[in-house]
Image (spheres, rainbow, N blue to C red):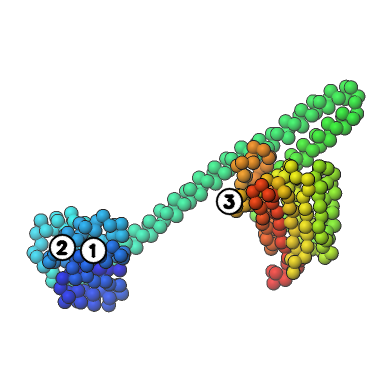
Amino acid sequence: MILIVDDSPENIISLKKVLEKNGFEVDTALSGEEALRKILKKSYVLIILDVQMPGMDGFEVAEAITGYSKAKETAIIFLSAASANVNLITRSYSSGGLDYISKPVDMNILLLKVKTFYRIYEQSRALHEMQIELRKEIEFRKEAEQKKDEFISVASHELKTPMTTIKGYIQLLERSLDTNNMDVVKNRLHKVQNQVEKLNLLIADLLDISKIESGKLQFNKKYFSFDQLIDQIIEPMQQANPGVKIIKKNKINEDVYGDEMRLEQVIINFISNAIKYAPETAEIVINSEVRGNEIYFSVQDYGIGMTEEHRQKIFEKFYRIEETSSRFQGLGIGLYICQEIIDRHLGKLGVNSKLHEGSEFYFQIPLHPEKVEN
């Protein structure tokens, strides 16, 4: 918007008519005082300001608005009927003006200047927006680089831990073989096997994250018994964790269409996390049921829970809750991979949680995704 400030109504009418005819939005003020009141309330791209006015002259108005935040990007063109002399022109620029036109005004020259200032304003605004976006992009690169460095550090530590443990048990195994104590040998072999399995899961997660990044995570979808899959998962996990009672609620009698191996990966992740992050709890509850045209599956624990802030970020890549990172191992990519798997099943994944009261991780997937896709 353009503000015309002139104590002569005739001058304002003629300038306003020409500018509006050329597509510009125009506001007017008949005095410097009125102009200041309007500038405090509105933002203007350009002010066409008469120099010689009763009360506040144009120079005083220009000097007064230089400190206004609303007017700091506003261009000022001075108009004056007085003959142009060096002192007048010098004061025009020192007062904050960007240009000077003598009266009577040549409308063609004025329009040319107005269009030029508008073009400069649009270019300046576009440049400013580009700078803002560039700053955001730079901050996102910095954050991504920091996360990558943290992930490499954590991954190195997580991979090194089971390797060191395996090495230690192998050394103990060698000594046990010398004593021919088979019970000790079996116990230590079992512990080595657990560490190898942990290492295998870490490597599998690293491979999956690489496949997701490259768009090569493969899926083999078909109909299968969801309830049978749950039973196959619960049995060995219950045996491996006798201190926690895994309670199964409900039963799904329908076959589900999806990648059985990938959904098994999600379910195991949910149950493993429930056991890991609820070390004091005596039980976890697994629920699966048909809700409308969807399968709903959830794992409820009664462990440490999490705050709303962590709940919003828990499925982000490399995200680990700072307060628990020293107590619980992990790369911060398991739930991110689960999110990708459920997304590829046209489903939804989420968590309900309260600090110190436990968490319920869940997913919903369509029973017949071909109907959703169509």
The residue where tag 3 is placed is: 309
Image position, residue 363 (x, y; %): 71, 58
Does the rendering let one see residue 46? no
The residue where tag 1 is placed is: 36
Q: Secondary structure at mark 1?
A: helix
The residue where tag 2 is placed is: 56
Q: Amino acid at mark 3?
A: Glu
Image position, residue 156 (x, y; %): 65, 36
- Quadrant location of the C terminus in the rendered image: bottom right
Q: Could you tell me how many numbered marks the image carries?
A: 3
The image quadrant that residue 198 belongs to is top right
The image quadrant that residue 249 belongs to is bottom right
Q: Amino acid at mark 2?
A: Met
Whether 209 is drawn above or below 51: the answer is: above
**344 and 331: which is toward the camera:** 331
Judged left or right of residue 334, residue 226 is right
Judged left or right of residue 304, residue 242 is right
Q: Which mark is drawn over residue 166?
A: none
Residue shown at the point (40%, 57%) measured from the top left:
129
Counting residues from the N terminus, which is met first, the one under dot 3 or under dot 1? 1
Residue shown at the point (50%, 45%) measured from the top left:
142
Residue shown at the point (72%, 62%) measured from the top left:
365
Report the Cα–Cα distance between label 2 and label 1: 10 Å
